[in-house]
Image: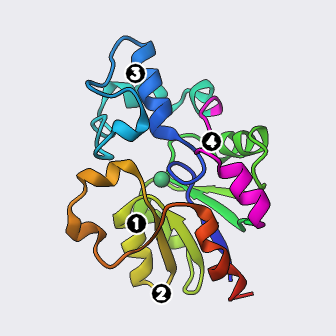
């Protein structure tokens, strides 16, 4: 069994970083102070958005993102050591790898794909895979991956049908029994 983790929304608080970046460049996201205020993952308009274009190749932005709350402590104390990080960020794997080292998270190889659906090419049936994007989790589940949704505040704005039937956790500590039962 391999353990594969998405990066943003699982170990890295991308949404908070984006909110702070938008504020810094004078284009704040309305009614949004904190990542928990965000109701949808479409909060900043997707790939064509001007903010997205500004951060896409900005290694300073990606290197200075914060960890998800308590994630390092949770991973270290529970022995959660991924075999791979799998992300669809626009920056290269080396930036994500450096960030993981800087944040003193468990180190593993990073694979970066162009689109979330491309993650499927790197997953195998039986893998345990944690991601915060419901459509990605469902795609992985349908190909026999033990895919688990990391719950996020922005799931409030997601169609209930998109979440229905997905295994979900609120904290990585909840996958410990799943990992231990399979080794
Ligand atoms: Mg993610």
* Marks 4 and 2, how far apart at CA: 29 Å
Earlier in the chain: of badge 4 and badge 3, it is 3
Above or below 163: residue 23: above
32 shown above or below 36: above
Residue 170: % across, % down: 49, 61
Labels 4 and 2 touching (C-beta < 8 A):
no
Per the image, label 2 sits on a secondary structure element best described as loop
Extreme-top residue of the structure: 26
Write down the residue under mark 4.
67
Q: Is residue 115 left or right of residue 7?
A: left
Q: Give the labeled residue for mark 3.
A: 22
Q: Residue at x 36, y 11 (%)?
A: 26
User: To which residue does mark 2 refer?
Assistant: 144
Mark 1 vs ligand 1: CB below 8 Å: yes
Query: Relative to 118, does residue 55 appear above or below in the rendering?
Result: above
Q: Which residue is pictured at 58% across the width and 86% down the height?
A: 126
Q: Earlier in the sequence, mark 4 or mark 1?
A: 4
Where residue 136 is drawn, which disc sits there? 1
Task: Specify whether residue 66 is painted magenta.
Answer: yes
Whether residue 51 appears in magenta in the rendering, the answer is no
**Marks 2 and 1, Cα distance to the nearest angstrom?**
13 Å
Disc on the earlier residue, 3 or 1: 3
Which type of secondary structure does the marked residue at label 4 adopt? Answer: loop
Give the side of residue 6 with respect to residue 163, left or right: right
* Mark nearer the N terminus (4 vs 2): 4
- Residue 117, x across and y down, in percent: 41, 64
């Amino acid at each position: 069994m391999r353990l594969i983790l998405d990066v943003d929304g699982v170990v890295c608080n991308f949404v908070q970083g984006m909110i702070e970046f938008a504020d810094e460049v004078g284009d704040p996201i309305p009614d949004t102070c904190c990542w928990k205020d965000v109701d949808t993952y479409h909060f900043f308009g997707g790939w064509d958005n001007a903010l997205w274009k500004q951060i896409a190749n900005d290694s300073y932005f990606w290197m200075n993102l914060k960890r998800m709350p308590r994630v390092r402590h949770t991973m270290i104390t529970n022995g959660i050591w991924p075999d791979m990080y799998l992300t669809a960020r626009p920056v290269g794997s080396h930036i994500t790898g450096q960030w993981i080292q800087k944040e003193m998270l468990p180190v593993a190889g990073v694979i970066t794909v162009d689109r979330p659906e491309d993650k499927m090419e790197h997953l195998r049936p039986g893998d345990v895979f944690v991601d915060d994007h419901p459509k990605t989790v469902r795609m992985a589940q349908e190909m026999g991956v033990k895919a688990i949704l990391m719950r996020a505040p922005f799931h409030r704005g997601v169609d209930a049908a998109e979440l229905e039937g997905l295994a979900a956790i609120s904290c990585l500590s909840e996958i410990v029994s799943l990992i231990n039962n399979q080794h």
